[in-house]
């Protein structure tokens, strides 16, 4: 199969994953009432999720990822889009969109006797879990902890740490510019976006 066909197919599949993930996140929030002390719901269009997914697919195809790795990252992209959408709409990250892909990545690593994903997930999750404990789930939610663990499993400790520092800076700047600095913000979309961007530019575990 020529590269142009592979790239077009990858862009289509990952674009569909972005669109489908946004739709899934919205469906999972359909019957959920946002927390009184949580972030305000934010409406969104699904096409940016599809566009970002397509870009990720193109980047992965250009990097020559194996079909098996592409399949795993396709599922991860669906989950990242869904998690971001759900957090925007109802201020929550459903376990199926965090624990599910985390188990997939850790399982793939264990099957090949590669424990780097598990170590990366643990290294990144520990400080996030400490923040969730200290804030009693208000400043940092447990869904964020699970999403951060997924980032650590995929990107490694160093890659995830850099990605999440950039995510925190972006969240601060946007909150400051939108006068939302004193209100709770949904941090999940920033985490998901930083992981997605990293998938496109660095080779994952």
Image (cartoon, rainbow, N blue to C red):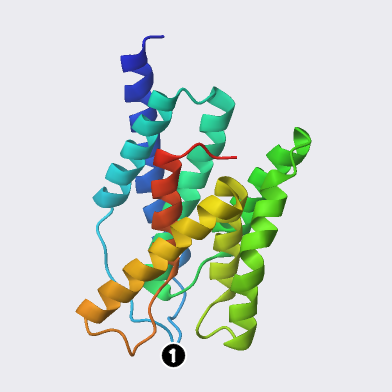
Which residue lies at the image location 54% right of the left edge and 24% below the top edge?
Answer: 67
Indicate the position of residue 176 as horizontal and vertical percent values. Answer: 25, 80
Q: Nearest the camera: 192 or 78?
A: 192
Indicate the position of residue 120 as horizontal and vertical percent values. Answer: 65, 53
Which residue lies at the image location 33% right of the left edge and 67% below the top edge?
Answer: 170
Q: Is residue 27 visible?
A: no
Indicate the position of residue 60 as horizontal and vertical percent values. Answer: 42, 31
Horizontal relation, residue 24 to residue 106: left or right: left
Horizontal relation, residue 27 to residue 107: left or right: left
Q: Nearest the camera: 50 or 62?
A: 62
Is 30 above or below relative to 7? below
Which residue lies at the image location 69% right of the left edge and 38% below the top edge?
Answer: 108
Which residue lies at the image location 67% right of the left edge and 47% below the top edge?
Answer: 117
Quadrant in the picture for residue 104: top right
Q: Quadrant of the N terminus?
A: top left
Q: Quadrant of the C terminus?
A: top right
Is 183 above or below relative to 123? below
Is 90 above or below relative to 18? below
Quadrant in the picture for residue 171: bottom left
Indicate the position of residue 19 as horizontal and vertical percent values. Answer: 34, 47
Q: Label 1 neighbourhood size at 10 Å, few (<14), some (14-19), many (20+)? A: few
Q: Nearest the camera: 190 or 93?
A: 190
* Residue marked by disc 1: 37
């Amino acid at each position: 199969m020529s590269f142009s066909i592979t790239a077009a197919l990858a862009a289509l599949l990952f674009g569909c994953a972005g669109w489908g993930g946004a739709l899934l996140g919205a469906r999972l929030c359909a019957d959920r009432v946002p927390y009184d002390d949580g972030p305000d719901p934010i409406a969104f269009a699904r096409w940016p999720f599809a566009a970002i997914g397509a870009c990720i697919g193109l980047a992965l195809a250009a990097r020559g990822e194996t079909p098996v790795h592409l399949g795993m990252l396709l599922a991860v992209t669906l989950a990242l889009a869904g998690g971001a959408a759900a957090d925007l709409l109802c201020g929550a990250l459903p376990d199926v969109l965090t624990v599910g892909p985390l188990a997939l990545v850790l399982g793939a690593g264990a099957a090949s006797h590669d424990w780097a994903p598990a170590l990366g997930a643990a290294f990144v999750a520990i400080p996030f879990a400490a923040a969730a404990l200290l804030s009693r789930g208000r400043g940092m939610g447990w869904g964020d902890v699970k999403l951060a663990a997924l980032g650590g499993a995929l990107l490694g400790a160093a890659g995830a740490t850099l990605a999440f520092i950039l995510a925190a800076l972006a969240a601060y700047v946007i909150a400051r510019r939108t006068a939302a600095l004193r209100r709770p913000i949904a941090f999940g979309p920033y985490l998901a976006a930083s992981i997605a961007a990293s998938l496109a530019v660095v080779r994952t575990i």
